[in-house]
Image (cartoon, rainbow, N blue to C red):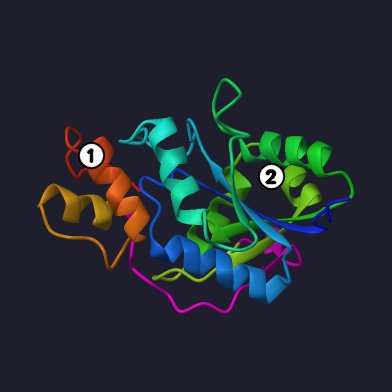
Amino acid sequence: MAHKPKRIGVFGGTFDPIHNAHLAMAQAAMRSAGLDRVLFVVSASPPHKRRGPLAGAEDRYAMVSEALADEPGMAPSRVELDRPGPSYMADTLRILQDEYGDAELFLILGMDSLSDLPNWRAPQDILGRARILAIPRPGHWSVPESLNGHYEVVPFQETTLSSTAVRARIASGEPCDDLVPPCVVRLIEERAIYDDTGADGAG
């Protein structure tokens, strides 16, 4: 009988595209909290982003799958892609809680997202289902007092690497092998994922 993970990290994002800092964040969270697994939850329609992702959902899921193929304890998740409507984290955690039973869930967030968490849908539901693992991000982020006791900060060297920066490199024709796993670079090129999208957009 396969070992069931007891401590599961939930790392949501558009991953447009996934890059090396995403992997480093997940690895840091695993070490810090002793996680058995980290699920990279690829969002279909993130309600907090003004614009939608530039790459399609299946392309973004394929890139995440490629990036995680050789990463122990990490796996892609379709939990938000296979249901209709906006991707609300409260719903995602409820579904994962049902799927993994008595496992303890840890939600991996950047400090910027943590500071905005009270504005998300059903924040108390989120806090009731998962412990927050906060990743340091550049800038000063003020965390509301209502979140005290619900999160811990993961030791992590701040980075400015973003999906936007990766897309800018791609749009300008520059190599991005130092920012993105080589297998993802190959997939982007093979599928011409960003050829018609340009480099603008949030991410």
Residue beneath the point at 59% across and 35% down = 78
Along the viewing direction, whichever of 83 and 152 lies nearer the viewer = 83
Q: Which residue does the numbered mark 2 point to in the structure image?
A: 123
* Residue 200 image point, x, y percent: 21, 43
Q: From which residue to which does the magenta span run?
A: 144-163
Q: Does dot 2 land on a helix, a strand or a loop?
A: helix
In the displayed structure image, the side of residue 151 where residue 191 appears, left or right: left
In the displayed structure image, the side of residue 72 where residue 201 appears, left or right: left
Residue 146 covered by magenta stretch: yes
Q: Does dot 1 land on a helix, a strand or a loop?
A: loop
* Residue 88 image point, x, y percent: 61, 35
In terms of secondary structure, what is the magenta stretch mainly?
loop
Q: Which residue does the numbered mark 1 point to in the structure image?
A: 194
Amino acid type indicated by mark 2: Pro
* Residue 182 image point, x, y percent: 32, 59
Q: Is residue 111 above or below residue 187?
A: below
In the displayed structure image, the side of residue 70 where residue 4 appears, left or right: right
* Residue 154 image point, x, y percent: 60, 74
* Whether residue 13 can be seen here: yes
Residue beneath the point at 17% across and 60% down = 175
